[in-house]
Image (cartoon, helix red, strand yellow):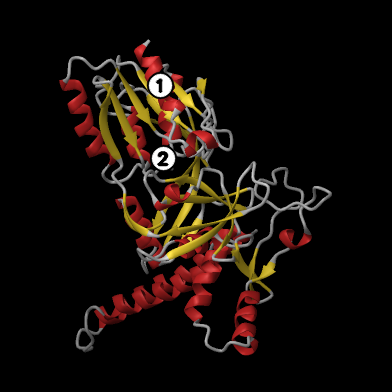
């Protein structure tokens, strides 16, 4: 019904535009001495089309006219699919989600706040961007967020490997702000933060209803300043405060060293702009040597980053085969294969993972595990099996939006499940405190044998 109404509206609107244009052109041609610019009829049409565009914005999408009001449609209460919808305790969709709503309600709330809220100095731009953030937050997807221009710039700096803060990837898990991965050699790791730590407070401010972007902005700060995080960890009797001194975080995403003289150890901290060039430099050094017994690819505490970088990294072991499968909203499967030459294929490889290995790390580990190109050692990974796209808006702000779920080449979904290691080796609190690394020790043992 909505689409029929819109189609009729478009037809009725374009028809007078067409007739008006023909009439003006006929009049102009029949009166050659009529002194108006030849472009006048075109400008008239442009104005009409612009007006039509504005009308289209008003009526388009899910909004339509009903009794003279702009209405946004609810959902069908009899729908067989309730994916992403809120259900009450009886498993039914609440009435407020099924009813059509008058969009003027938005402006009513806006006016009420402007007229009655105690603080008269709230910028309307703050309310505007807050509303946009609320739209994205309504998706109830912790990986989809709205980024103001400042937040978008900061996010890009992180992908470039440069920012100031504590050096930890955080997310919202089970509605609780959680440490996904403290970066190697970061203030967060040195202070004692661990993957899966629950952040209950930031500088004594409760995080229960705090958005991810707000938490990031509060934790990030100038080099030399302090932030106090109240942390609860499995095994703690009560929460503990961690005072962390912020520092400049310059992430070198890939580093190579040789252990035991001939075992290549590749530490990968993130998939950012420098990852593939640095990985290429490391691979050149490896293949130039004739005595390399094996490779240890350390993906622990690697929170991910660019999808293509993960595909390219996996391609160094997988030759022109599928690395990852995306399932998008249209239900279609999209297979991504690497175009890289598999320069490391045939070299015995161990991949180290833990609860801080997420997203791109899981793509690499899952793909090499499926093709039996590597042995996975360590602990179960984080389980972030979704793909986000950064959509830039015209004012410099962005939407980081989940657009797909990803699966390993064999069709395994690791979302919320993670990649299970072939050889499980846990890292205990005692190991951390005594600077022991049983996971790396196991990897070295497997290559030696």
Residue 126 spot, x, y in % from top left: 50, 76
Closer to the camera in the image, 154 or 110: 154
Closer to the camera in the image, 166 or 224: 224
Real-space Cα separation, disc 1 to disc 2, in angstroms: 18 Å
Residue furthest out toward the left? 288
Residue 442 spot, x, y in % from top left: 43, 21
Residue furthest out toward the front? 434
Work out which quarter of the rendered image holds the N terminus and state it.
bottom right
Count residues near mark 1 (Cα–Cα under 10 Å), then give few for <14, some for 14-19, many for 20+. many
Note whether 386 is above or below 313 in the view shown.
below
Q: Secondary structure at mark 1?
A: helix
Q: Quadrant of residue 17?
A: bottom left
Residue furthest out toward the top? 449
Work out which quarter of the rendered image holds the C terminus and state it.
top left
**What label sits on residue 302 in the rendered view?**
2
Residue 75 spot, x, y in % from top left: 69, 55
Residue at 43% across, 35% down:
435
Determine contact: label 1, label 2, CB under 8 Å.
no
Q: Earlier in the sequence, mark 1 or mark 2?
A: 2
Q: Secondary structure at mark 2?
A: loop
Closer to the camera in the image, 50 or 250: 250
**What label sits on residue 443 in the rendered view?**
1
Residue at 46% across, 73% down:
54
Note whether 328 is above or below 419 in the view shown.
below
Q: Would you say residue 58 is visible in this rendering? A: no
Residue furthest out toward the right? 90
Residue at 40% across, 76% down:
48
**What label sits on residue 270 in the rendered view?**
none
Residue at 22% across, 79% down:
38
**In the displayed structure image, the side of residue 393 where residue 32 appears, left or right:** left
Residue 293 spot, x, y in % from top left: 28, 15
Count residues near mark 2 (Cα–Cα under 10 Å), then give few for <14, some for 14-19, many for 20+. many
């Amino acid at each position: 019904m909505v689409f029929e109404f819109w189609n009729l509206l478009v037809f009725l609107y374009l028809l007078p535009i067409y007739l008006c244009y023909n009439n003006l052109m006929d009049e102009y041609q029949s009166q050659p001495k009529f002194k108006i610019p030849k472009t006048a009829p075109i400008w008239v049409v442009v104005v009409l089309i612009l007006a039509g565009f504005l009308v289209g914005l008003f009526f388009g999408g899910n909004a339509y006219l009903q009794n003279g009001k702009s209405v946004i449609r609810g959902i069908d209460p009899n729908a067989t699919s309730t994916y992403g919808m809120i259900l009450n305790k009886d498993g039914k969709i609440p009435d407020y989600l099924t009813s059509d709503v008058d969009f003027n309600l938005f402006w009513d709330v806006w006016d009420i706040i402007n007229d009655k809220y105690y603080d008269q100095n709230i910028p309307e731009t703050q309310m505007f961007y807050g509303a946009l953030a609320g739209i994205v937050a309504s998706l109830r997807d912790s990986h989809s967020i709205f980024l103001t221009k400042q937040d978008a710039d900061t996010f890009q700096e992180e992908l470039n490997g440069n920012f100031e803060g504590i050096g930890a990837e955080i997310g919202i898990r089970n509605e609780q702000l959680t440490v996904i991965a403290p970066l190697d050699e970061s203030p967060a790791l040195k202070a004692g933060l661990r993957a899966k730590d629950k952040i209950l407070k930031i500088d004594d401010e409760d995080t229960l209803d705090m958005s991810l972007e707000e938490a990031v902005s509060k934790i990030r700060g100038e080099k030399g300043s302090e932030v106090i995080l109240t942390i609860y960890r499995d095994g703690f009797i009560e929460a503990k405060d961690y005072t962390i001194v912020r520092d400049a975080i310059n992430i070198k995403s890939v580093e190579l060293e040789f252990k035991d003289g001939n075992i290549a150890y590749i530490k990968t901290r993130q998939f950012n702009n420098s990852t593939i060039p640095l990985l290429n430099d490391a691979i050149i050094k490896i293949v130039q040597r004739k005595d390399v017994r094996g490779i240890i690819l350390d993906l622990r505490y690697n929170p991910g980053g660019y999808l293509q970088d993960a595909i390219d990294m996996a391609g160094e072991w997988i030759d022109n085969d599928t690395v990852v499968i995306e399932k998008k909203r249209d239900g279609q499967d999209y297979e991504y294969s690497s175009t890289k030459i598999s320069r490391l294929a045939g070299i015995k490889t161990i991949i180290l993972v833990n609860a801080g290995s997420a997203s791109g790390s899981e793509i690499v580990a899952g793909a090499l595990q499926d093709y039996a190109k590597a042995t996975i050692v360590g602990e179960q990974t984080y389980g972030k099996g979704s793909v986000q796209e950064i959509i830039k808006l015209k004012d410099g702000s962005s939407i980081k939006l989940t657009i797909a779920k990803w699966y390993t080449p064999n069709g395994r979904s690791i979302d919320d499940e993670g990649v299970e290691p072939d050889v499980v080796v846990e890292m205990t609190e005692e190991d951390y405190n005594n600077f022991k690394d049983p996971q790396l020790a196991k990897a070295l043992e497997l290559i030696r044998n």
